[in-house]
Image: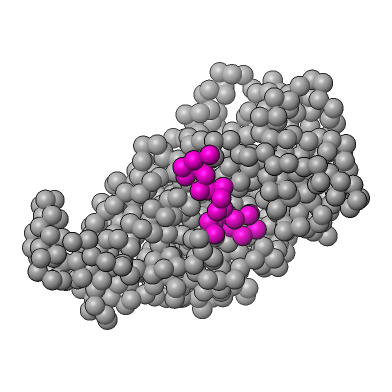
Amino acid sequence: MAEEKHDLRSKDWFQGDPKTSFIHRSWMKIEGIPDHEFNGKPVIGICNTWSELTPCNAHFRELAEMVKRGVYEAGGFPLEFPVMSLGEPIMRPTTMLFRNLVSMDVEESIRANPMDGVVLLAGCDKTTPATMMGALSCDLPTLVVSGGPMLNGKFRGEDIGSGTDVWRFSEDLRAGKMTEHEFAQAEACMSRSAGHCMTMGTASTMACMVEALGMTLSGGAAIPAADSRRKALAQVAGNRIVEMVAEDLRPSQILTREAFENSIMVNAAVGGSTNLVVHLLALAGRCGIDLTLEDFDKLGSHLPLLVNLMPSGKYLMEDFYYAGGLPVVIQELKHLLHMDALTINGRTHAENTEGTECFNRDVITSFDEPVQKEVGIAVLRGNLAEDGAIIKPSAATPELLTHKGRAVVFEDIEDLHARIDDPNLDVDESCVLVLKGAGPRGYPGMAEVGNMPMPQKMVEQGVRDMVRISDGRMSGTAYGTVVLHTSPEAAIGGALALVQNGDVIELDVPNRRIHLDVSDEELEKRRANWTPTPAPLTERGYAKMYVEHVQQAHLGVDFDFLVGKSGTKVTREAH
Ligand code: FES
């Protein structure tokens, strides 16, 4: 067992004054824990986002057992604890509404309990940023074990990807290219093992983000959930967290500005989700790092796409793992990344990835022969998005990246659902679809509705992409020429709120411009007549707190009062 450099925080609970430590130890003994477990061993909290309502994390009990095995093996004392989980495909109105709530759950659970170190078990989209945000505000030694992606989907002899092929199949069904029977068959073929979405959607992006930030064991992001090597990784993580406690290695030593810059660059190279932007901004806010939207454009937008995975390419996470996974990407970017950045195993990215081999250049290309050039997230500005908006050019139709068209406006999501398939909708393929009320306050929760469906009329004409603009997000598995995260959002009077049917909108991605072709005088007139519509069901409870405190997309959608950290000091004893 590694020697502690400092006093264990948990000693305060288990070896403090006789009366209170009696209480703490005695009640723990309900669980059958013998005396020697309290004898100054590092207590490792295993923060588990397991839930049967979060199918992507449903294998986490087994994973937690492997972490425990590793903790015991290294001389620690593991205590697993549950936190609220966020099942992306099931929760309403959107998991993003609850990301900050989970972060509070995690933060307060860690601070209030006798933990010396924490392992975060996260997988489905929001569970990763949410648990990390909470843990970073405590800054105890922490590492992340992600749940791993599902095995490749297999349908009629072809690989199919979660999310990405749902969008494709549903468009095919609407266009009459797929039968209802085939559509139903594809369901089971898509989700055929434990794990999170196996495209480079948000969950895989988050797993890569964690590895690029140095917060998990090197090479861990891509291991499929069903692969026995993921269990081995969980056990090694259990070993490592005990050592981290001994070394007093905390996230604040790992999550430097350089680590965040690495994550932005890696995200561009893997074709990661646009959701990285809000999550990384929120994480940086908890760490006191001054990260801005501009950093994403400056550092990532000119980088090439090196990973040929859906939705930007053709392969899936299982293929990515067999090709060598993220260490290969890190090596390909070594002339750009901060390779001396520290990771949780106490070594740098350079040390962790040295000698890494790529086993399939069709899946992970070299830097000089990429899948695509210049693909990272682009940040747009203009009178329609004074605080910025984003687009993922690698998922867009290249010809639409410079486009001028007439706006077809939907005032909110109900309006969109009611009229998008109306045969009388006044729309043609050159139009720009505009959706209001999908932002942090407007929805509320900034739902993934930005990749709004093509109008039925357009589908019937074979149109598969149009320029779409909203203040919402889009699924990391989605694609299209979709401008997202428009800030300020419509619900607080951003210019998006003032767009009317027939206005001309210009999108100019090469020049990073999004412009509403309406005079300032006319916009002022419209603004004077504009009145906010409160988001539904936000009069009380958590939703009320959410709309009162959530920040805009360009700030990461965290609560204003959660930015920063409070450490792990507790005010008073309970007894
Ligand atoms: Fe859970 Fe995609 S729905 S990761």
User: At which x and y percent is residue 184?
Assistant: 53, 22
Q: Is residue 489 above or below residue 386?
A: above
The residue under the point 56% across, 47% down is 547
Front residue of 361/55: it is 55
Task: Report the number of discs.
Answer: 0
Q: Nearer the viewer, residue 518 or 425?
A: 518
Quadrant into which the C terminus falls: bottom left
Q: Nearer the viewer, residue 529 or 497?
A: 529
Q: Quadrant of residue 480?
A: top right
Q: Is residue 533 left or right of residue 112?
A: right
Which residue is pictured at 81% across the width and 25% down the height?
425
**Residue range corresponding to the magenta coloring:** 539-560
| Residue 54 seen by the camera | yes
Camera-side residue of 96 and 271: 96
Q: Can residue 330 be seen in the rendering of this structure?
A: no
The quarter of the picture where the N terminus appears is: bottom left
Q: Does 221 sit left or right of 387 as displayed?
A: left
> Where does residue 154 sit, x and y in percent of width and height?
51, 34
Question: Which colour style is shown?
Answer: one colour
**Residue 549 within the magenta-colored segment of the rendering:** yes
- Residue 26: give x, y in percent of width and height: 10, 57
Q: Would residue 57 appear left or right of 306 to someone viewing this image?
A: left
Residue at x 85% of width, y 27% of height: 426
Residue 237 is one of the magenta-drawn residues: no
Residue 301 placement: quadrant: bottom right
Residue lying at 58% horizontally and 61% vertically, measured from the top left: 281
In-image side of 434 versus 125 (left or right): right
Residue 220, horizontal then vertical, whole percent: 43, 59
Q: Is residue 339 above or below residue 318?
A: below
